[in-house]
Amino acid sequence: MENLESKKRCNITFQKVMKIIGFVILGITGAIGLALLLGYAVMLLWNWLMPDIFGFVEITFWQAVAIIVLARLIFGGFKHPHHTSSDKGFMSKFHNKKCMPIKNHSFDKWSHYDEFWKNEGEKAFNDFVEQRK
């Protein structure tokens, strides 16, 4: 009986590993395909626009890919676009909490701002400006 359960666990683990390997291969293939497609699109657009507008020479496919890599290095690096190194510490505070309310109570006060400004704000602002003069 134990031997049968052991084989089932082993088979499930093997299936999970194969599924992960499949996703990795699919992801790598997709990334390469997207890079090739993007390089081809940049080459076509460059060769269509740049020689006529600016008098630049036409480029090859690999030069277009190099332009994409260069632009990525200059303008964004190779990090995830939504997370910077400074965000990791800040966001980890929220992801580590199991049940944290998202509501920020300091913004509740702003619902009274218009009423305050109508009653006291403009006068208080004008008094402040007069003090600064």
Image: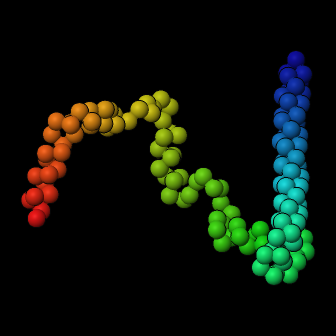
Front residue (pair 98, 26): 26
Relative to 119, residue 123 above or below: below
Front residue (pair 21, 127): 127
* In this rendering, position of residue 83 left or right of residue 28: left
Q: Residue at x 27, y 36 (%)?
A: 114
Relative to 85, residue 119 above or below: above
Relative to 122, residue 32 above or below: below
Which image quadrant is residue 110 in? top left
Residue 23: x percent and y percent? Answer: 84, 43
Quarter the N terminus occupies? top right
Q: Residue at x 90, y 70 (%)?
A: 61
Residue 113: x percent and y percent? Answer: 26, 37
Which image quadrant is residue 104 in? top left
* Whether residue 50 can be seen here: yes
* In this rendering, position of residue 103 left or right of residue 110: right
* In this rendering, position of residue 17 left or right of residue 131: right
Residue 95: x percent and y percent? Answer: 53, 40
